[in-house]
Each structure stands twice: as structure tokens, then as C-alpha cells.
Amino acid sequence: MKTVMGIINLQEENSLIREMTDRRAVESMPFAGRYRLIDFTLSSMVNSGITNVGVMLPDKPRSVLDHLRSGKDWDLARRHDGLFYLPAPQQESTTRKGDLKNFYHNLDFFEHSTQKYVLLTSGSFVYNVDFSQLLRFHQNTSADITMVYHTVSEETTGKNVVIETAENGLVTDIAEKPAVYDGSQVSMNVYLMEKRIFVEMVRYTYEHGGQDLLMDGIIRRASEYNIYACEHDGYVAHVDSTAAYYKSNMDILEPEVWEELFMGENSIYTKVKDEVPVQYKETAEVKNSLIANGCVVRGEVENSILFRGVKVGKDVKIKNSIIMQKCDIQDGSLIENVICDKNVVITKEKWLKGAQNYPLIVTKNVVI
């Protein structure tokens, strides 16, 4: 995979998860107790042997920069290649929207790289993928573009790219749909192509009025390319809404999902923070939950995820909830079907309860 450069595009729509992305990018959302969403794509690239990774920064990049820093935790702080940040050009009210403009203004980064292929990905997916298999598939089929898809097992909504393929993987139809159903083949926003094809696509599409790389560069010009697709049959979650964020975190509590993502040959890396172990006091009772380092638990926690440094007081009951870093749940409180963002304080004997499929959200730094 030394011949492949990775690109993680963080220019994504966040309107369906706006409550938690007001000050952060979707890809820097805390996930599974100690990770961020971008960790899954970035770790998959590193585990596949990719050593040159460019991150297409969003409009609010601070949280991404703070998390990734030099890339040392992913072994990307290198003298040659390594981790690069590709900033978005300055926005003006009269200019075109969309991610294509950002690729166009960073074309010199691609043209000056030594790699032959470009692996274009999104940072809002949860998976653990070996991209070296994708490269072999791409070379064996002599495709212009190779994409990765998964077969959904339930109805989903959002920005879904649905494809149809022949038996040999040739893509016969590709379209963006607002809803998909059981058995649909949905793109994971992973595209592999030669650098020369990528550069030509970006330059031609942008200079002819295009705005979105996927829609204007790939879907609308699909007839001009030889596009193949290969299937990933492991766990996949696309975190593009509050409901999807909640469900995917709850999925992590399933042993088979946890083992596939975190206990296989390829690890998921994240920013290292040294914390003391969890303190379970005499009154603590924990069932089917994920508790991160630095937490102090005195109450009951069931089917929930607690991030680093959370304090759970006496007689507290937390169920089916996600409690992010440094939250303080004080004595006698009841929390069910709730997402608490960072640094939230729930004072004594408060009861918060959301719907089973649509949790109540408490935004960052709020005191209730």
C-alpha cells in the first residue's frame, strides 16, 4: 500500500446531528468511551500500510486538529509522507458551495505526491477495513474507480449512495437516495482510483461548474468511467444523524460488534490520555456497560457508555445512555435514554428521560 495515498474528506453535511456538532466536526464526535469517529477510517488506513494521509479540514477544524495533532498516535509523524492537513479555501458569499472547491484548491498536494493511487474516504463511518484487499481487487479488475459497499439489513434514511452490480462487481447503476431498504447495496464513501484519474476528475468537473465531487464528479459522469465495487461484510455504521450516533454507540455493547472492531488483528488507535483506572465503590452496580478510565461510580449503570472522568453519585440510575467526558451525575438522579455532552452537571435528584429510539440530548457545559 506504499503506492496509495489516503484522503479523509471532512466536508460533510451535519444538519441531522446539529445539536452535538455546533462547535465540532461530525468526525471528531466522541465515540465508544474513548475514541473519535475519525479514528476508525484513519486506523484502517494505517493498518493497511498507508503512510501518506491528507485530511480535508472542515469549516470548524479546531476539534479535529486538537485530536489528531502531529499524527504520532497513528505512527504518522514521519520525516517523509505522514499526516497532512488540507485547509478549506476562504468562504465567500458569492462562491460555490460543496467539497469540490476544496479538492481543486489543493490539487498541488496530489500532483506532488509520489503515490500512484488515491484512496478517498469519509470520516463519519464506523468500521475496521483492510484496504489492501481493495487495492488487489482494483488491480485485478483494471477498474478506473473501485468503491466499497455494504448490504443494509434494515431501512435507513439520510444521504445514501445506492448501487447495483453485476456478478463480477461491475457497477451497473449508481444513484443517491434519501431512504434505502433491507438488502440494498449502499456505498461506504470509499473510492480508490489512480491519481491521474482523480486529478482529471476534480479539475474538469470544477472548471465546468461542478460543486460536489461525488454527485458531479462520479455519479453524473459514471458512464465515462469503468466502475467496480467490492463488498465489506463486516460491521458498518454511518453516523450522519443523532439517531445513528445513538444506535451505533449502543451497538458497541454487543459482544460480537466489539470483538470485530477492537479485538481483531487490526487495532483502532486514538489520542492517548493517561488516566487512573475506574473506581467502583461499594454501592456501584454495573451491567452490560462500557466504562472508560478515570470514572468514579457509586450508583447503578446499565446498558450505557461512560466516557473518561465521569462521576456517578449514590443512588443514581443510568440506563441506555451515553455520558461524555467529565460529566457529573449527582446523587439520586435518574438518567434514561439520554446523551449528555461533555462537562454536563446533573444536580441531585433530577430525572431525565428520552424516547427509546430518539434520546434526549443535553448539550455541552449545561447544568441541570
Image: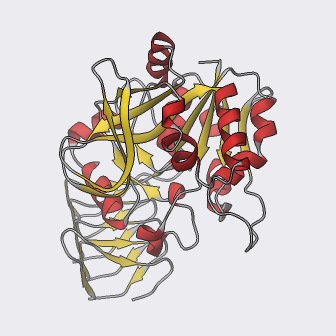
Nearest to the observer: residue 157 or residue 26 = 157
Q: Position of residue 223 (x, y in %)?
A: 49, 33
Residue 160 at least partly seen: yes
Residue 119 on image: x %, y %: 57, 31
The vertical placement of 130 against 150, above or below, is above
Kindly tell me whether residue 272 is visible in this rendering. no
Q: Quadrant of the C terminus?
A: bottom left
Q: Quadrant of residue 179?
A: bottom left
In the picture shown, does residue 45 fall above or below 214?
above
Query: In the image, 145: left or right of 238?
Result: right
Point 34% across, 47% down: residue: 237
Residue 232 as seen in the image, left or right of residue 79: left
Kindly identify the residue that appears in the image at 46 percent across and 37 percent down. Answer: 268
Q: Quadrant of the N terminus?
A: top right
For this rendering, which residue is in front, 43 or 173? 173
Residue at figure coordinates x 70%, y 53% from the top left: 101
Compared with residue 69, is residue 136 higher up or lower down, i.e. above or below?
A: above
Q: Position of residue 158 (x, y in %)?
A: 36, 59
Q: Position of residue 276 (x, y in %)?
A: 48, 53
> What residue is rendered at 26% in x and 61% in y?
304
Look at the image and name its color scheme.
secondary structure
Q: How many numbered marks does the figure carry?
A: 0
Q: Quadrant of residue 186?
A: top left
User: As displayed, is residue 314 above or below residue 297?
Assistant: below
